Image (spheres, grey):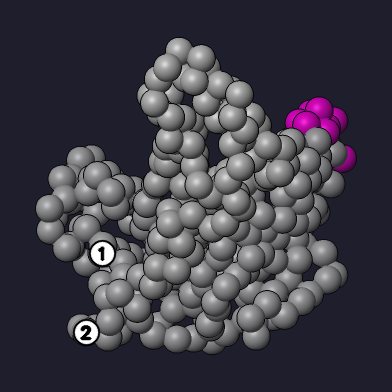
């Protein structure tokens, strides 16, 4: 029985994800410029068992496949190198005053039963969001769903800031016998809401605030930058946290760290319309 003895090394698929230029670099400086806060984050999915355990299981599955194929005389082509991560992930964020876009890419692996090689599953998507709605973009299949207009939500209105005073409102509800039960339920829910800590740190030259994430599986934290000349009010994350994500630490989820970050910089408006390159199909209205 042969034992699979591949080396641990970054795979070509991982290189493609982490070494690819940022979208604004790919689009260049042509056309109208938009002021943004931007960041590139690299990382991986840890899972409840951890990345090392996930890779160990992958190796066991390959070995089992090789053993079975050799027993039955079938050809084998086991991997010559193992990936660094079972699930690699990268995010590129661009936050403008009234709109945001998040580019996400990743790759995961499974055993190809026919020859025991590794079958990789690359994913590349983007999500454009503003008060005008959401456009979900599959950059591989070239499909755009939702509000995907030619201006990339350039004319969207800034989202209003969330009202403050939530704790006071909850206390007033608790003091009202008719609302006390609802107040108790809301307090239970709010216990799982993200909360800003007193800690701050510098990541790639940008200062960010650390937030606790009790709702994340296994807990966790995130670091959001809220400096710069403007505070973006778009995107699910920025509406809740009010800033640019620079780090994410979830013991049983994603672990992300900024590889590049900049506040108050300009990029081509083409960053917000990747579907304008041609060849895309549109669904959900608002397409080009």
Task: Please identify the quarter of the rendering in which residue 73 is found.
Answer: top left
Name the quarter where the C terminus is drawn.
Answer: bottom left
Residue beneath disc 1? 273
In the rendered image, residue 6, in percent from the top left (x then y), is placed at: 58, 46
Task: Please say whether residue 190 is visible from this viewpoint.
Answer: no
Decide: is 135 above or below 111.
Answer: below
Which numbered disc flags the more N-terminal residue, 2 or 1? Answer: 2
How busy is the neighbourhood of tag 2: few (under 14 within 10 Å), some, or many (20 plus)? few
Task: Please identify the quarter of the rendering in which residue 33 is found.
Answer: bottom left
Q: CA distance from mark 2 to mark 1?
A: 13 Å
Residue beneath disc 2? 30
SS majority, magenta: helix
Boundaries of the magenta span: 175-186
In the rendered image, residue 153, in percent from the top left (x then y), is placed at: 29, 64
Q: Is residue 261 left or right of residue 274?
A: right
- Identify the residue shown where x is 64% and y is 65%: 257
Task: Please identify the quarter of the rendering in which residue 202 is found.
Answer: bottom right
Q: Is residue 194 magenta?
A: no
């Amino acid at each position: 029985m042969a034992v699979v003895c591949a080396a641990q090394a970054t795979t070509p698929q991982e290189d493609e994800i982490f070494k690819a230029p940022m979208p604004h670099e790919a689009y260049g400086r042509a056309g109208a410029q938009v002021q943004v806060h931007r960041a590139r984050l690299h990382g991986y999915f840890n899972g409840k068992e951890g990345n090392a355990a996930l890779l160990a299981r992958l190796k066991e599955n390959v070995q089992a496949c090789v053993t079975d194929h050799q027993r039955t005389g079938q050809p084998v082509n086991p991997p010559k190198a193992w990936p660094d991560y079972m699930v690699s992930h990268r995010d590129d964020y661009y936050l403008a005053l009234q709109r945001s876009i998040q580019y996400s890419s990743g790759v995961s692996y499974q055993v190809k039963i026919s020859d025991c090689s590794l079958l990789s599953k690359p994913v590349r998507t983007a999500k454009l969001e503003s008060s005008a709605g959401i456009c979900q973009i599959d950059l591989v299949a070239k499909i755009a769903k939702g509000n995907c207009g030619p201006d990339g939500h350039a004319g969207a209105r800034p989202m209003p800031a969330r009202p403050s005073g939530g704790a006071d409102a909850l206390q007033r509800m608790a003091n009202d016998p008719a609302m006390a039960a609802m107040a108790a339920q809301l307090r239970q829910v709010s216990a799982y809401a993200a909360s800003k800590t007193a800690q701050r740190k510098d990541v790639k030259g940008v200062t960010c605030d650390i937030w606790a994430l009790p709702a994340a599986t296994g807990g966790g934290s995130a670091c959001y930058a809220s400096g710069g000349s403007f505070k973006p009010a778009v995107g699910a994350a920025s509406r809740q946290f009010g800033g640019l994500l620079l780090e994410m630490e979830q013991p049983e989820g994603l672990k992300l760290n900024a590889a590049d970050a900049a506040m108050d910089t300009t990029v081509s408006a083409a960053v917000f319309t990747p579907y304008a390159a041609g060849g895309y199909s549109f669904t959900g209205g608002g397409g080009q």
